[in-house]
Image: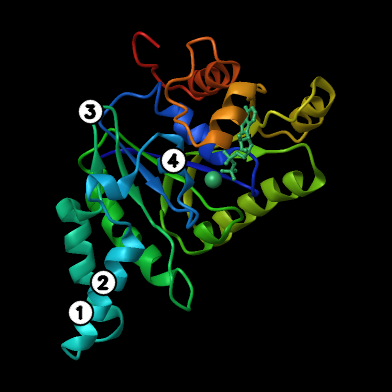
Amino acid sequence: MAKIIVSTGRGGVGKSTFVALATKYLHPPMLLIDLDPDESLAGMLGIDLSSHGKKTISDTLYAITKQNKASGRTGYDVLDDVLQQAVQSDCIYSSPEFDLITLGTKFTVGCYCAPDAVLKDAIPALAQGYRELLIDSPAGLEHLNRKVVVDIDDLFVILDPSQKSLKHIERVRAITAALKVGCHHLHLVGNHRFTTETEEQLRSTGGAYLGKIDFDPAVRQRNLEGQSLLDLPGNSPAALSVKGVLQKAGYDIKQGD
Ligand SMILES: Nc1ncnc2c1ncn2[C@@H]1O[C@H](COP(=O)(O)OP(=O)(O)O)[C@@H](O)[C@H]1O
Ligand SMILES: [Mg+2]
């Protein structure tokens, strides 16, 4: 059974960057799950899913819903078919280092309940085949409300230095408790905007603060140009910070990195 690792936080704090860089240090086999409809994680890893013939969960769901409508079936009764397709690796990009599955963008009216439900149902079976499931979340807390994952081993809350971020920590605690989302470890991680003083404030919240991710101009540049973060040099300040945070959370780092 895989360890379930989730990166969460407000918009633009560095959640996807954290997940992309964590793949450099964790041991395969690992499955990355991009729950953000903006699909930025694949790009950060230098992957063009469609050129590998892979579809997102939303695309697969849309195609199957259309087929089923034509044959008179509607609504949630289509989910089993989608699930099978997804598990049969229509949606799973595979490489020696990691596999990747993406929620994707919906180009139809409506919420993300159905594609989220597909993933929620698929996750327990998927978790059997991997050492880690590494989940990149959309901004905010809705993914927790939807209980896409119900038993999290390590929840990394990525924070920017703002009152809103401090409130975000309280909301994460309240929602996981109220909804009974199992969360074995809740880790606080400062983003690249923290200073020594603002870090002190974060420490005083009493949570498990693991440190900050250092500012790295190469990360900003690569994200701007749509290049992979995986080829950052070994001395990248951001990558080394992510490595340190994972070590503090008790992860065994891959040899050679
Ligand atoms: N350590 C860092 N150093 C410099 N820029 C960073 C760093 N981490 C993230 N960024 C920048 O912050 C922006 C948001 O990062 P991203 O990981 O996409 O956030 P999120 O997934 O939380 O929305 C991106 O433009 C990215 O280049
Ligand atoms: Mg993101």
Residue 6 at what x, y percent from top left? 47, 42
Q: Give the secondary structure at mark 3.
A: loop
Q: SS of the residue at dot 1?
A: helix
Question: 10 Å neighbourhood of mark 4: few (<14), some, or many (≥20)?
Answer: some
| Mark nearer the viewer, 3 or 4 | 4
Residue to which mark 1 is pinned: 67
Disc 3 or 4, which lies upstream in sequence? 4
Classify mark 4: helix, strand or loop: helix
Residue under label 4, please give it. 43
Badge 2 crowding class, 10 Å Cα cut-off, few under 14, some 14 to 19, many 20 or more, is: few
Q: Is residue 136 left or right of residue 61?
A: right
Quarter occupied by the N terminus:
top left
Which residue appears at 29% of the width and 69% of the height?
61
Taking the spot 57% from the left edge, 61% from the top edge, the residue there is: 178
User: Would you name the residue on which mark 3 appears?
Assistant: 96
Give the distance between the C-alpha atoms of the residues marked 1 and 4, in whole angstroms. Answer: 30 Å
Nearer the N terminus, badge 3 or badge 1?
Answer: 1
Pointer 3 local density, CA inside 10 Å: few below 14, some 14–19, many at least 20 = few
Real-space Cα distance between discs 1 and 2? 6 Å
Indicate which disc, 1 or 4, sits on the residue closer to the N terminus: 4
Give the x, y percent position of residue 180. Answer: 49, 58
Measure the C-alpha gap from mark 3 to mark 2: 29 Å
